[in-house]
């Protein structure tokens, strides 16, 4: 694949992403309708995958498989989040943004960056003329994606069912996969996008390896910015005085699925270094309260 083709595809996907997100931003800003934000994000991934696949037109098996993976993930997540917010009502993430155009714009700009960056592995695979025969790493990537999306779908459905049950009103979700991780849906999402990157590696050459920024960006985003920190802070404020919640937090991994009996016995330094149990996830608790 030549660098000219690279820049054309990268530039095109950037323009399409900006225009696509701008349309939904205008709808949100003018109508004060923030229920389409997650749908706009998920479906934008589909647009980029199909656009690059069709424009290149080589229809290599690797290209088709990864594009189908993105379509499945984007459709499932976009529709799931849209239906959920329509059922639950307003998106509380936008309580301080609906009447603040600057804050709203920053959110949409960030979403456009997220879509374009995380899509990079599939964009480069679909744009590439270099398509070696299938390798073991392709299969490993596909299996990783399959495990990730299965975990994400299962976790989302378990939490939705838990929240929709009247008897669980006011409780945090601790059933199913949520027994083994405080955020199993995020674990699944990170896992599946690393799977797509792994499956893209047979195509990569030279500077193209920078597409690793896609899964790295997603991982950092969920670990430190818009994912786990916000949800941990919200849950801590609600349940800080509930002994069962404190015990759940002490014995349940923040991300990676692990048996509570094992996780609760691990030393604090090990949890921080290897299992992503960062201090920012427990700012409302003292070390003594969590026995860390």
Image (cartoon, rainbow, N blue to C red):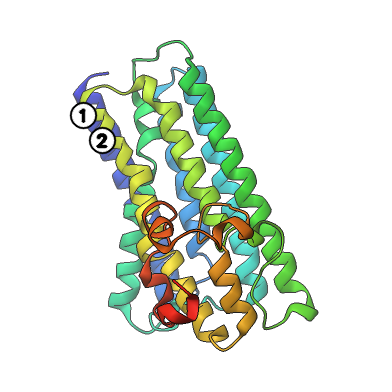
Question: Camera-side residue: 213 or 30?
Answer: 213
Callout 2–callout 1 Cβ contact below 8 Å = yes
Question: Camera-side residue: 251 or 111?
Answer: 251
From the top left corner, tell me how far across and down residue 244 is, in percent. 64, 79
Looking at the rendered structure, the number of numbered marks drawn on it comes to 2
Q: Which mark is residue 284?
A: none
Residue 107 can be seen, yes or no: yes
In this rendering, the answer to whether 252 lies above or below 203 is: below
From the top left corner, tell me how far across and down residue 233 is, in percent. 45, 77
Question: Camera-side residue: 203 or 97?
Answer: 203
- CA gap between label 2 and label 1 equals 6 Å
Q: Quadrant of residue 203?
A: top left
Left or right, 76 with reference to 207: right
Residue at 60 percent of width and 71 percent of height: 248
Residue at 57 percent of width and 66 percent of height: 251
Mark 1 element type = helix
Q: Which mark is residue 207?
A: 1
Q: Quarter holding the C terminus?
A: bottom left
In this rendering, the answer to whether 168 lies above or below 35 is: below
On the image, numbered disc 2 is attached to which residue?
A: 210
From the top left corner, tell me how far across and down residue 97 is, in percent. 38, 80
Q: Quarter holding the N terminus?
A: top left
């Amino acid at each position: 694949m030549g660098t000219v083709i690279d820049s054309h595809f990268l530039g095109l996907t950037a323009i399409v992403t900006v225009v696509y997100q701008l349309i939904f931003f205008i709808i949100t800003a003018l109508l004060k309708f923030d229920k389409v934000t997650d749908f706009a994000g998920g479906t934008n991934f589909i647009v980029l995958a199909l656009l690059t696949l069709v424009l290149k037109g080589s229809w290599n098996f690797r290209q088709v498989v990864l594009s189908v993976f993105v379509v499945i993930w984007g459709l499932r997540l976009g529709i799931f989040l849209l239906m959920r917010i329509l059922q639950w009502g307003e998106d509380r993430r936008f309580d301080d943004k609906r009447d603040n155009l600057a804050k709203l714009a920053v959110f949409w700009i960030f979403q456009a960056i997220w879509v374009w960056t995380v899509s990079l592995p599939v964009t480069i695979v679909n744009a590439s003329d270099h398509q070696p025969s299938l390798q073991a790493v392709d299969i490993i990537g596909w299996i990783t994606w399959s495990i990730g999306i299965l975990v994400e779908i299962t976790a989302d459905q378990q939490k939705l069912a838990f929240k929709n049950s009247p008897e669980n009103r006011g409780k945090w979700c601790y059933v199913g996969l949520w027994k083994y991780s405080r955020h199993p849906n995020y674990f699944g999402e990170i896992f599946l996008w690393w799977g797509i990157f792994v499956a893209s590696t047979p195509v990569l050459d030279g500077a193209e390896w920078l597409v690793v920024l896609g899964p790295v960006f997603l991982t950092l985003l969920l670990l430190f910015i818009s994912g786990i920190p916000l949800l941990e802070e919200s849950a801590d404020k609600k349940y800080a005085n509930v002994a069962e919640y404190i015990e759940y937090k002490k014995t349940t991994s923040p991300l990676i699925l692990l048996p509570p009996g094992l996780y609760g016995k691990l030393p604090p330094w090990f949890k921080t270094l290897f299992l992503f149990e960062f201090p920012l996830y427990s700012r409302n608790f003292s070390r003594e309260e969590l026995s860390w």
